[in-house]
Image (cartoon, helix red, strand yellow):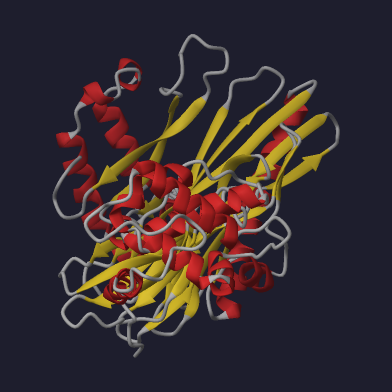
Amino acid sequence: MWRKASVLAVFFAALVMLSSCTESPEDPLIPGPDVPGDKVSPSEEEIAGIVDANLAILVQENVVYSSEKEYITAQPEAFSAIVALGDAALPYLTEMGENILPYDYSAENYRRILAMYAAYTIRPEQYVLSYPSPDGKYALVWEVVTFVTAVDPFGGITYSVSALDTETGETATAKAEVCKDESASVHWSPDSRYAAVSVGYRHSYRDVYVFDIGRGECVRLPGEGELEARLEKDLTYYDADTDEEFSCVHILFDEWGTDTVTARIMLSSVVGGGVEIGSYTYDLAKREITQLVIDTMLIVSYAEPATVSIKASYPIIDVPDAAVSERINEQIREFIDFHYKRYAAGDVSAAADSLDSSMQYEIARCREDVISIHFFGTFAGGGAPQYVLDTAFTFNLKTGEKISLTELYSADEIASFIRTYFAELDESRYPTLFRLYTKDEIQQDFENHFDPASRYAEDAAYHSYYLTENSLVLIAGHYKDYAVDLNSTLAGERAFLAEIYTDGTQS
């Protein structure tokens, strides 16, 4: 457990410095004018003169340091003279600090930086950030390390962050030195055992630090190097449509679990933009990744007999058991490749010139040793109507095997779910669909599809459902594409998704 030279210590340091300079008025403020008598406060002009004179001593044209502390260590009396002015100097110091320039290594800019640091030393509470835990027992405290924005011109102030016991004033965790992300924030776990901090460096990368109160530690979540080593490939995506490469890796906080944290993985280019490529779950007790899902975003091309461009987007599942990971990924690849080759061959033979197809996915549920993935694909070529494919996988993360719907619910339960769903379904939610089909017709399609004796039984058991956090989604039917303009020549067909809330509620 680390002891804290807490925020209070910074206050005390400022007070000691102030008293040491004001108790001996015979010691001049160097090299400014004589110190006014005890009963006469310096004017604004005199304050500006004292500050400017001492900043000139602190930062000289031919001496360059990398931080405020190095300048102060070299000329401590000059810095003390500025701080001794106290609150009266804050307006002038703050005004100077507001004019700090990025990428400016001149002596004048460093004087502005030292002015801001002096303002912080006089009134640290104006710059220290504090984020209390849900139970109020702890606070995540951000203390300024440096205002030298030239080190990271887009990150701004560099802070030292740690968790503080609000009752004792002691630090409860190790510290991390970070720059504050403009778009990120602090995320306390509901039980106040952990706090996550997202920090950013503009387009370069973003990290997540987790402060573990129980162990008194600060953990940086796995980033680019760890993920690429684990995957044995670079996390880079090239967008052929825009001729842009996305290779800057960002880790962002997503949500808390029980002693786990889930992080999202994003890529950006050097000029910004971004694309989300996956997520992972990090076990805070074991200090390891337990679930990793990466979207490979592969571009696959078939060149015969016509021009075919197929963009396949599917995940790589990575869990501690390498055999399980390999088994899951193999099944995903085989299924998608089968569909692409199957539809590519059929569509190209019918289309005289081209085929344009894509498949994307969403992780609908990933917890309790179960991952459920919904795939959405489109196939169109030669001006023919677009075909929309909805399919899904649900895997046991301990064995790597697909989970059958019949392992989760009996045939009678599924039949009951379907009856209840359509009895409560508001047809106005799907006006285009119900212009062409009756609710009874769609319900009959679902009952036939999920009948154990149906020819669709195997597909229904493994690829016609997926799980969300609190629902079961059944996929069936083959209807005019009710999501597009029915007068369009590209209006093909798609399945209908019935989301059933198994706790009895209905959205």
**With 155 as the anchor, is 357 left or right in this view?**
right
Q: Is residue 371 visible?
A: no
The reply to whether residue 118 is in sight is yes
In the rendered image, the quadrant that contains the N terminus is bottom left
Quadrant in the picture for residue 138: bottom left
Look at 46% across and 73% down and name the residue there: 176
Count of picture labels: 0
**Horizontal and vertical percent for residue 162?**
36, 74
| Residue closest to the eye, 437 or 86 | 86
Q: Where is residue 108? Give x, y as percent.
A: 61, 48
Relative to 157, residue 270 above or below: above
Quadrant assignment for the C terminus: top left
Quadrant of residue 284 within the rendered picture? bottom left
Of residues 268 and 79, the one nearer the viewer is 79
Q: Is residue 56 above or below residue 121?
A: above
Most extreme residue toward the right is 304
Front-lying residue, 187 or 388: 187
Residue in view at x 31 percent, y 76 percent: 16
State left or right for residue 121 relative to residue 206. Answer: left
Q: Position of residue 260 (x, y in %)?
A: 37, 73
Q: Residue furthest bottom?
A: 1
Q: Is residue 420 positioned above or below 322 on the image?
A: above
Rendered view: 52 above or below 240 = below
Instruction: Compare residues 360 and 302 and report the one nearer the observer.
Output: 360
User: Furthest residue to the top?
Assistant: 487
Q: Residue at x 66, y 69 (%)?
A: 225
Answer left or right for 498 relative to 177.
left
Find residue 122 and report its horizontal and vertical position in percent. Answer: 34, 61
